[in-house]
């Protein structure tokens, strides 16, 4: 029998990650192209199509073997049509991406939000493998969320379901968020939020080891975790606050779907247990105890491949 392939495409603000993926989820080839955000990102579909054709020729891959493309974009997506309402980082607004990419490649295309794709990837082959109810949170420069309920990824009435980063956690006086609101979870529990809180906190801690990092202007979330591990009081305080708020937000979200597993990914998740332990403690403090009993926490396993693998799974589920 001939081997068939899915194509996964994970479109980010600086690169588009692409992969050929076998039906069992194994990546046979992966590569990246730069995201050209000039002219409101209009060349991106053609850039992707051209690159796919090139790689297929390299591998002498027959068109008949491709089952479809599953693509993720950071923004508000109409998953039924592949239409992008808005993807700020790449410049798209009211962009008919899915049909355009399908016309250019001749393959069927399914599109979803990038955080939803990461959740799908982890649900298929990663830390949330086989879970019918799953919350996936991506902690990077922002906070992304994806929710699987009854085995299906949630999209909502107009593509904003599971936008966990924009749950309001500071009702008044919070920092401004990219979405236009203030006090969103993303302003607190992202890498950016951790750095901001670190800078605010050290005013009260003249001895903090975070001061030298701030002087050079290069404080990172990793520095705050490292300092916290080494016993720095200011850093410990920041991590406590950040995980407390995040745990509360996840606990509140958990009541809606009663998750079996909560998977944390993104750059900040590299802190491992230093993040998970206080986070889980906070979750158990705020969640209904029966809800908490059903859930375990884990760090995402697929890393940068979660999006393309989720894309493959999107095709697998829909075709
Ligand atoms: Zn927001």
Image (spheres, rainbow, N blue to C red):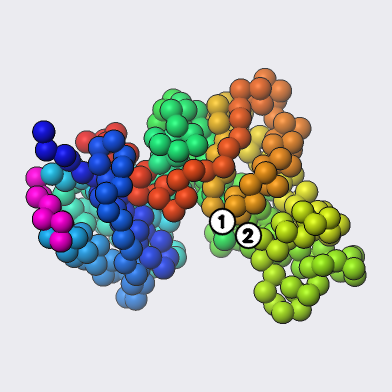
Q: Which SS class for mark 1?
A: helix
* Magenta segment: 58-64
Q: Does the magenta segment cover residue 62? A: yes
Q: Could you tell me residue 143's position as x and y percent?
A: 57, 52
Q: Could you tell me residue 71's position as x and y percent?
A: 31, 51
Q: Which mark is residue 267?
A: 1
Q: Residue, x 24% and y 67% (percent of image)?
A: 47
Q: Residue furthest bottom?
A: 216
- Residue 145 seen in the current view: yes
Looking at the rendering, which quadrant does residue 10 occupy?
bottom left
**Residue 170 higher or lower than 162, as above or below:** below
Q: Nearer the viewer, residue 181 or 199?
A: 199
Q: Nearer the viewer, mark 1 or mark 2?
A: 1
Residues at marks 1 and 2, CA–CA distance in whole angstroms:
8 Å
Crowding near the residue tagged with mark 1, few <14, some 14–19, many ≥20 C-alpha atoms within 10 Å: some
Does the CB distance between marks 1 and 2 fall below 8 Å? Answer: yes
Within 8 Å of ligand 1, the CB of disc 1?
no
- Residue 103 seen in the current view: no
- Please identify the quadrant where the C terminus is shown: top left
Q: Which SS class for mark 2?
A: helix
Q: Residue, x 90% and y 65% (percent of image)?
A: 204
Which mark sits nearer the N-terminus, 1 or 2? 2
Left/right placement of residue 21 relative to residue 291 reads left
Mark 2 sits on what residue?
191
Looking at the rendering, which quadrant does residue 183 occupy?
bottom right
Q: Residue, x 39% and y 35% (percent of image)?
A: 124
**Residue 38 higher or lower than 102, as above or below:** below
Q: Residue, x 35% and y 68% (percent of image)?
A: 35
């Amino acid at each position: 029998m001939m081997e068939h392939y899915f194509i996964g495409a994970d479109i980010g603000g600086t690169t588009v990650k692409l992969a050929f993926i076998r039906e069992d989820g194994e990546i046979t080839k992966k590569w990246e192209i730069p995201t050209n955000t000039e002219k409101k990102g209009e060349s991106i579909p053609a850039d992707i199509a051209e690159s796919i054709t090139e790689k297929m020729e390299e591998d002498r891959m027959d068109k008949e073997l491709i089952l479809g493309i599953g693509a993720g974009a950071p923004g508000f997506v109409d998953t039924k049509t592949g239409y992008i309402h808005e993807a700020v980082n790449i410049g798209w607004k009211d962009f008919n991406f899915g049909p355009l990419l399908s016309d250019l490649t001749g393959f069927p295309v399914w599109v979803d939000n990038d955080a939803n794709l990461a959740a799908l990837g982890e649900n298929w082959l990663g830390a949330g493998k086989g879970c019918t109810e799953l919350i996936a949170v991506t902690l990077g420069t922002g906070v992304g969320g994806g929710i699987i309920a009854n085995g299906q990824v949630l999209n909502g009435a107009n593509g904003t379901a599971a936008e966990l980063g924009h749950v309001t956690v500071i009702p008044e006086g919070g920092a401004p968020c990219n979405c236009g609101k203030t006090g969103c979870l993303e302003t607190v529990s992202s890498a950016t939020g951790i750095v901001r809180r670190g800078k605010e906190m050290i005013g009260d801690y003249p001895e903090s080891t975070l001061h030298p990092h701030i002087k050079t202007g290069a404080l990172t979330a990793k520095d705050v975790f490292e300092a916290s591990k080494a016993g720095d009081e200011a850093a410990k305080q920041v991590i406590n606050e950040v995980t407390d708020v995040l745990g509360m937000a996840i606990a509140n979200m958990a009541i809606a779907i009663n998750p079996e597993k909560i998977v944390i990914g993104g750059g900040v998740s590299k802190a491992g247990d230093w993040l998970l332990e206080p986070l889980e403690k906070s979750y158990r403090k705020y969640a209904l105890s029966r809800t908490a009993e059903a859930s375990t926490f884990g760090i995402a396993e697929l890393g940068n491949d979660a999006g393309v693998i989720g894309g493959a799974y999107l095709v697998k589920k829909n075709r």
